[in-house]
Amino acid sequence: MGTKQLYIETYGCQMNEYDTDRIKNALDAEPTDDPKNADIIIVNTCAIREKADQKAFSSLGKYKSIKANDPNVIVGISGCVAQLYGDKLLKKIPHLDFVLGPRAIPKLPDIISNIERKKRRTVETSYDIEELFEVEPYHQEGKVTAFVSVQQGCNKRCTYCIVPKVRGDEVNRPLDDILRETTSLVNKGVREITFIGQTVNSWKENGYKFGDLIRAAGEIEDLNRIRFTTSYPRDITKRMIDAMRDVPQVCHHLHLPVQSGSNKVLKGMKRTYTREWYVDTINRLKDAIPDLTVSTDIIIGFPGESDQDFEETMSLMREMEFESSYSFKFSPRPGTVAAEYSEDETVDPDLASARLTELQAYQKEITSTKNKNRVGLIEKVLVEGESRNDPEFLSGRTDHNRILNFKGSKDLLGKTVKVKVTEGLLNSLRGKLVV
Ligand code: 5AD
């Protein structure tokens, strides 16, 4: 029997992209872009909002006919929706062979061989803590950027969030293990690493704190860039800021979700900081790193959000002028505290939509102004590949995490080059190679 073909669809966060690559490696299968060619089809799902969660079901629906045509094809669901609904999924979706929680990836090879031998449908949502970081991701040859997981799960208890329920409590990966994986990626040609964790900067292990991890990564030869995501505001410490300032490979961009500009709402969300504390923290960061850019996440329409609360969020947007922001309408998730609020605290969906539109329009303006203001500047870009829309253009990101496309020869891949910005668009920049 030859190598199996794996088709895997991925939704959600970077953690999920990383898990998809771990699944590819665990199965040692050949990835295919066409589900019709696949021996194994997996939908790797996200449960953060109801919309994402529903996508999982419509996706799985697409594979019903493939399974009907060839019963030997194995169809599975992984990720947070799998963990959330467990064996209910087998009842609901008759063509589903397995349900795999996000912490159970190391068990996947056994699950598949069991299904092949015994034709038994399987649900696996338990895990062994020692195995958590055992399966490393598949690395596509030639790729110059990579994620490295430093932490799984989350110890925060934000009242809207389902992550602790589906990904469990925080487990931090040992420093040596992180550095070993990072070094091995660098030896394969990777030049930029993004450390990932649910609250990445709360990482601590054996007396080491996040700032120490950054300093240690800064010692790895030929690693040109260090990024990390997602940071939790209250875990920003002096030790972390000092390390960000001192380690030249650290990119000067920080994603720091604020969620709301209203202290009342922040309290209801159990975010454990106030608006003033958040602003002060960004100021401390910018004192140390003057050109630092910041992006954020916002939830609109959290239960009880009044016009005044929303106005406070807008005033924070004006005060901070975030580089970019991801904003979402509040979505009640099963089992979370915020899903239990009484009906009279629910924000009218049309009102929430109007607020979201207003916030997003404002952000668009800020982002495009900021991008236009880069015109004429020379940026350092790590060349990641061809531009998606035009193969004549190369594409990479600036230190501040903006996409910059420019004409150049393909042998610049993996190199850091200087590019003069000629055009600032909404989602990217264009420029000219400086020689
Ligand atoms: N409803 C809406 N948005 C949510 N997020 C997390 N949970 C919810 C929810 N229940 C958003 C937060 C988080 C981002 C990843 O998703 O803004 O930072």
Image (cartoon, helix red, strand yellow):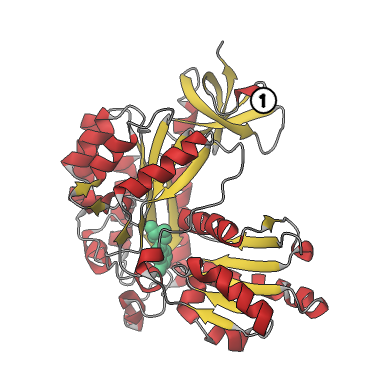
The image quadrant of residue 252 is top left
Residue at 19% from the left image edge and 44% from the top image edge: 237
User: Badge 1 local density, few (<14 within 10 Å), some, or many (20+)?
Assistant: some
User: In front here: 420 or 170?
Assistant: 170
Residue 277 % position (x, y):
18, 49
Locate residue 302, reporting x and y percent.
Answer: 35, 68
Q: Is residue 159 above or below residue 3?
A: below
The picture quadrant for ligand 1 comes to bottom left
Tag 1 residue = 410
Q: Is residue 228 left or right of residue 101?
A: left
> What residue is rendered at 69% in x and 37% in y?
389
Image quadrant of residue 167? Answer: bottom left
Q: Nearer the viewer, residue 136 or 246?
A: 136
Which of 420 and 409 lies nearest the eye of the viewer?
Answer: 409
- Name the outermost residue toward the front: 1
Question: In the image, 420: left or right of 263?
Answer: right
Q: Residue at x 31, y 41 (%)?
A: 320
Q: Residue furthest bottom?
A: 91
Kind of residue at badge 1: Lys
Q: Quadrant of residue 66?
A: bottom right
Return the residue found at the far top. 435
Q: Is residue 108 above or below residue 384?
A: below
Q: Position of residue 300 (x, y in %)?
A: 39, 62
Q: Above or below — where is 335 with respect to 50? A: below
Side (left or right) of 276 relative to 80: left
Q: Quadrant of the N terminus?
A: bottom right
Determine whether, in the image, residue 102 is placed left or right of residue 172. Answer: right
